Image (spheres, rainbow, N blue to C red):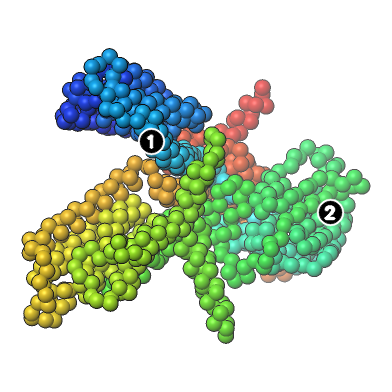
Amino acid sequence: MKERALTWFREHRTIVIDVLVTVLICVVILLSDASLFEGDGLLFYWSGNISKLWSVMLALPLALRRTRPRVSAWWFVAVVVVQLVFGPPFVIGDMLSLPMFYSAIVYDSPKRTNQYVIAAGVLAVAAALVISFGDAYGPLLSSHEPSGTSFWANTLIASVTFLLILLTTLIAAFWQRARRQTIQLLNERNDAIVAREQEEKLIAASAERARIARDMHDIVAHTLSIIIIQSDGGRYAATHDATLARSTMVTIQHEAEHAMHDMKRLLGVFGGSPHADYHDISALINQATSVSTDMSLRRETVGTPQPNRLSEQASIAMYHVVQEALTNIRKYAGHNVNVVVREEWTDTDVTFTISDDGRGASAALDGHKAGYGLMGMSERITAVHGTVDAGPRLNGGFEVKASVPLTASASLPAAAYSPSSSQTSDASPVSAPAQSAATLQSPDTAVTLAGSHPSNTGSPSDRVASAVQDDAASHAESTGSTGDMGASAPSSDSGTRVFWPSFLRLGKILRSRPIAQVHQSGPSNWVARLSHWTEHHYVLTDTIIVAIIFALLASTDAMQLVLLGQSAQNNYLIDVIVTLMLMGPLCLRRRFPRAVAIIFASVVFAQLLFLSPCYMADLAAPFIAYAAMLYGKRGTWKWLTPLIVVDGLFLGLKVMLLSAGYPSTWYWLTHDEPAYTQQLSSGAGIEFAIIAITLCIMGMFFGAWVKTSGSNPQVLQARTEALRAEQEKARVNAANRERDRISANIRSEVNDTLSSVIDETTQEIATIDAQVAAGEEPSPEWISEAFGAIGTQGRTALKHMRQLLSVLRETGFSDKNDGEQASGELNLTPAKSLNEQMTSMEHSQSANATH
């Protein structure tokens, strides 16, 4: 019941609040002094008690001003028109026309803005006419004597006054409407992120299956093709040479064991096994030449190779393109094939062309179809923004052509390459499954480890440094500028060279964090553009506002800097400096809320301790507390409340000491006698302390309320970043669970597949060794049969691998109901084994074939 009530309140919170506010206004009107409502109308004289009813009728439309702005606005207009003709000329309720006009512009469609502006302008002039007429001539149907005032002069003054007030309200409404558009965009984007969470988990799990299938094909299928070629070649070339036969079998055994080792790394805890890249292509070509002795392979290079301009993923992808092309040539091109591996380097890209003069299109006459190798090749190249094309040549043979762009500058050296990044070349946008243990942490955790300090102990400078580091780390995480912050300035003998990059990095830290901008849905105006500009450049905006206020305080004698106490003679410069120290941090209150709060509290404490006066700038304390709660992290109240209480109590002590004649707290600590007599009571200290603490606590509560209401662009932007970080973490977890669920089964399947080849080879090697040790020579027939058995095992294993790849590529998830439970939550617990999936897939294929 309670949850249902809370849900209902959240859904109808706006109208409930507006109704309560309307009721409160009506109660205030009915309890007000009746004399405020008396006046001469156009037709009658109205007494106060009866005129209250007009104010109540004008207040009632406020209840619908946000939920039904159009109905509310025209309801209000209708009441005003009737009032101007039959009622009193002006009542307290007429002041509600400003919030009604504001609400109509802000909450209704921008297409009706002109209607509201015209209606408001007409009513303002009409009200001026009616009020001036009543003052000049009195009611038409009443005996009241006219006052004799000038009708046209009063009408002009009233009209100009009303129109200026309406213009100010219109500017404020345009400003707020533009701000609401940004808030609406951010809310919609956050809702979309939440709505896509389940879909992103499914995408991540699917991408992880594709990654495993792609790498498993590159590792196991490539090895099995070598084993098959070696066994077929040994069957004919080594039948009369036991030594050659044994060495060939050892090679086969070694390749199978190497593939098994690579698969263990591939399916490791973090799914990141080191990959060969461009630099290993030469070894790959040499291996292909040694395995297939009837293959003539030539490598050509056009242009100047620039492998340092290949990104890590592009370098890995190119290796796998050459690997898959050579594997397919061994499998399908036939015997005595001439192969050319041609690489062409330009200033913008590199292109690899692997062509042969083998069977070409006729290779498909045996009925086989394109497998998953070309699919994986395409996915890898597409992921690095390259292109790939593969197919038979017109003059015979087959050709694979892949091109990838080069980076603008040299990529990281090989030493900086981490295995965890090797899998980020998935065609899917999900690259997280391949991240290392450190990067699997959420960004929030990373920020905490990098810069947050759980306690506020230590000197004020330590706390300030901690806060700046914490806020800067948050900024770096959200803007992706950690490299700019974390990198040290290049060493140089020139001080300017060191200073200037550091200054640039400082500028990046201090600038406003980007906020999503929107296009005006209605006619654009300068107010909306200025509103969006201030939202996007809020640090500069706050700086301008603080500079204006500081100039007003410091430039004239009418605006004194000192709020309480006495400034020393000829000490105006110190007052200006202290005021600047107090107001300066306000420029960054939205950018570094925690650091600003600590700096402000520290300056106030030092001022209360050593200086005589309290300054006007101290009144910024509630705004500092408000900003810290609104823009700060969770748990801000834990350290902000003690700061407020300490400074508030210290203010009370300072006021007591001023009453006793001590100019400062430090003077009281170091002198026995007071310096003068101040006209303050000792009890004023308690009052000042209570007022200061109360105002700051109210600022904290108001900041917390605004933060939870979802009506602040910076807060919503921070929520967007948190949601994206959480979504990324969820995708990582989904991919990790999908890999963990299937990796054990796949490892078992791969081990069984490769172990069958290894066992067969080991048995044959042992037989050869036993015969040689006995002084016997293995017969050619036996050697041929042995290689034939190894080849049969290899082909059987390759067929089984293709079944495994089909399971990973085509059956979707291994969860029940394709990864979703009835509740809609992603089920990432083990469900079907790979054997069950393969059996289910075989039955499905048999059923399709039957139909």
Residue positioned 54% across, 34% down in the render: 522
Residue 381 visible, this orientation: yes
Q: Secondary structure at mark 1?
A: helix
Q: Quadrant of residue 38?
A: top left
Q: Quadrant of the C terminus?
A: top right
- The residue mark sitting in front, 1 or 2, is 1
Q: Amino acid at mark 2?
A: Ser
Q: Which residue lies under the disc numbered 1?
A: 157
- Nearest to the observer: residue 432 or residue 659: 659
Residue 436 visible, this orientation: no
Q: Residue 289 location in percent, x, y? A: 80, 63
Q: CA distance from mark 1 to mark 2?
A: 90 Å
Q: Which residue lies under the disc numbered 2?
A: 355
Q: Residue 663 location in percent, x, y? A: 16, 74
Q: Quadrant of residue 6?
A: top left
Q: Amino acid at mark 1?
A: Ile
Q: Work out which residue is located at the far bottom of the displayed protein and give it.
A: 493
Residue positioned 11% across, 69% down in the render: 678
Q: Quadrant of the N terminus?
A: top left
Q: Is residue 385 above or below residue 574?
A: above
Q: Work out which residue is located at the far front of the displayed protein and give it.
A: 148
From the viewer's perspective, is 11 left or right of 425? Answer: left
Residue positioned 47% across, 64% down in the render: 509
Q: Residue 833 location in percent, x, y? A: 50, 41
Residue positioned 86% across, 61% down in the render: 296
